[in-house]
Image (cartoon, rainbow, N blue to C red):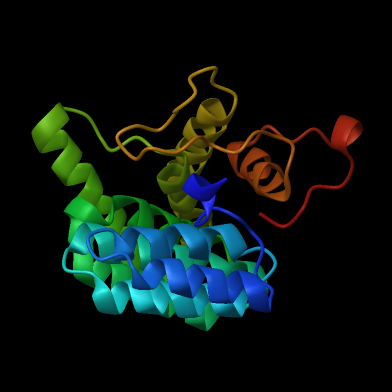
Amino acid sequence: MVAEWYLSPDWDEQAQADFRLRLSHERDRRVFYLGQKAAAIADEHPEDALALYDQKIAAAEYEDEIVPALHAQAMIHFRAGDYEAMFSAFERAIEVGGEFTAIAAITDYCSAVGLLRDETRYDTALAWLDKLDQRAMTQLGQPFVGFAASAARAFICWQTGDRELATNAARDALEMSISDDPLPGLPCIGAAPKPPSPVHDRLLVIAGLWDDDKLGPAPRP
């Protein structure tokens, strides 16, 4: 359909030419179409998707257009196993958007730090999590709520030796992951992944809920 020209995952020579032609006629929504097409082709053509996101970032005027593009680039790098490029994209997103526009990037960044056991970034990640908590306490009267944030704190605090805090955070994350709420973890919008997964296995160990008899040898937390 004509209305879906920017949503198609097709990216052969003809599809690229068609996209460029249609894009050349767009002015007001050029940034939007670049981002939509990048997302559509990211799974099969990650390098080209990164290039389209670069074009979106270069053309964008507002941080709420730039931050999601950088976040998307970070996730492409994550799936490719290029973790330094991933962290670089996350850090750029956070620099541009800060704690107001880049909440999702912050929590995913912190989660990646914990998942990958990147000790060089532990202090930075914990500082961001604390800042989100402080802001939520001021605005909402409670700490920040989000699966990625709780999982990140669980992983990092376990590695740094704060086992009680890690256990509590892991249990919070696990509770969110089995919630029936379609958007657990607000105000950071995004559904928590459902178990089972390697992430949940690590959280179960940290939470003290791993059962060797039923689940076998425990993974490294």
As drawn, which residue projects farthest toward the left?
138
Residue nearest the observer in this picture, 187 or 60: 60
Q: Position of residue 144 (x, y in %)?
A: 28, 38
Q: Position of residue 20 (x, y in %)?
A: 47, 74
Please indicate, yes or no, whether residue 12 appears anywhere in the rendered image: yes
x 60%, y 64%: residue:
41
Q: Look at the picture and state if 160 lies above or below 4.
A: below
Q: Looking at the rendering, in which quadrant would you find the N terminus?
A: top right
x 21%, y 69%: residue:
96
Residue nearest the observer in this picture, 141 or 52: 52
x 23%, y 69%: residue:
60
Q: Look at the picture and state if 123 lies above or below 196.
A: below
Task: Decide if residue 79 is on the left or right side of residue 114.
Answer: right
Q: Look at the picture and state if 60 lies above or below 192.
A: below
Residue nearest the observer in this picture, 62 or 153: 62
Q: Position of residue 200 (x, y in %)?
A: 66, 41
Q: Looking at the rendering, in which quadrant would you find the C terminus?
A: bottom right
Residue nearest the observer in this picture, 120 or 14: 14
Q: How many discs mark residues in the rendered view?
A: 0
Please indicate, yes or no, whether residue 122 appears anywhere in the rendered image: no
Q: Position of residue 201 (x, y in %)?
A: 71, 44
x 15%, y 35%: residue:
137
As drawn, which residue projects farthest toward the top?
180
